[in-house]
Image (cartoon, rainbow, N blue to C red):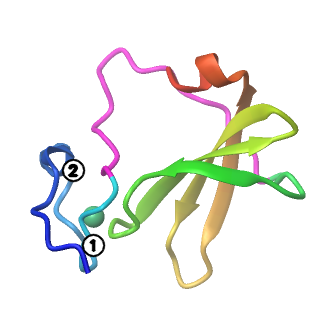
């Protein structure tokens, strides 16, 4: 078990809602000039997760790849989790969303 202290990205986040394993970044707060994405509940049939935010918060995000393109997968951790997707983008574009 890794006992390293939490990384510095934790201070960007709201207080953890579940016990935080401290291994993934937390979603940053929205910038005032942020771009609003279009979300769909249509899920790709298969995808690979490349990066993800910490799942200790009610909402977490994954950067996923499907067919060589990248999407953001948003998960709202309700009793029945809600899954929505934004994208797709090429890899370089996906990192600036
Ligand atoms: Zn966390």
Disc 1 CB within 8 Å of nearest ligand 1 atom = yes
Q: Could you tell me which residue is drawn at 52 percent across and 64 percent down?
A: 76
Q: Please, is residue 42 above or below residue 21 in the view?
A: above
Mark 2 — residue?
13
Q: Residue 62 versus residue 32: which sits nearer the camera? A: 62
How many marks can you see? Answer: 2
Q: Please, is residue 23 above or below residue 8 in the view?
A: below
Disc 2 CB within 8 Å of nearest ligand 1 atom = yes
Mark 1 — residue?
21
Q: Please, is residue 19 above or below residue 73 in the view?
A: below
Q: Is residue 22 left or right of residue 76?
A: left
Q: Is residue 73 left or right of residue 48?
A: left
Q: Is residue 38 left or right of residue 67?
A: left
Q: Could you tell me which residue is drawn at 61 percent across and 17 percent down?
A: 93
Secondary structure at badge 2 equals loop
Say few, some or many: other residues with alpha carbon within 10 Å of mark 1 (under 14 / 14 to 19 / 20 or more): few
Q: Please, is residue 81 above or below residue 88 in the view?
A: below
* Ligand 1 visible in quadrant: bottom left
Say few, some or many: other residues with alpha carbon within 10 Å of mark 2 (under 14 / 14 to 19 / 20 or more): some
Q: Is residue 36 on the magenta stretch?
A: yes
């Amino acid at each position: 078990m890794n006992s390293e202290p939490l990384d510095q990205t934790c201070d960007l986040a709201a207080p953890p809602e579940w016990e935080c394993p401290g291994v993934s970044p937390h979603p940053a707060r929205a910038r005032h000039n942020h771009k609003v994405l279009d979300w769909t509940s249509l899920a790709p049939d298969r995808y690979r997760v490349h990066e993800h935010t910490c799942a200790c918060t009610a909402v977490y995000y994954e950067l996923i790849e499907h067919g060589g393109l990248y999407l953001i997968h948003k998960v709202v951790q309700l009793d029945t989790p809600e899954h929505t997707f934004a994208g797709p983008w090429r890899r370089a574009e996906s990192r600036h969303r």
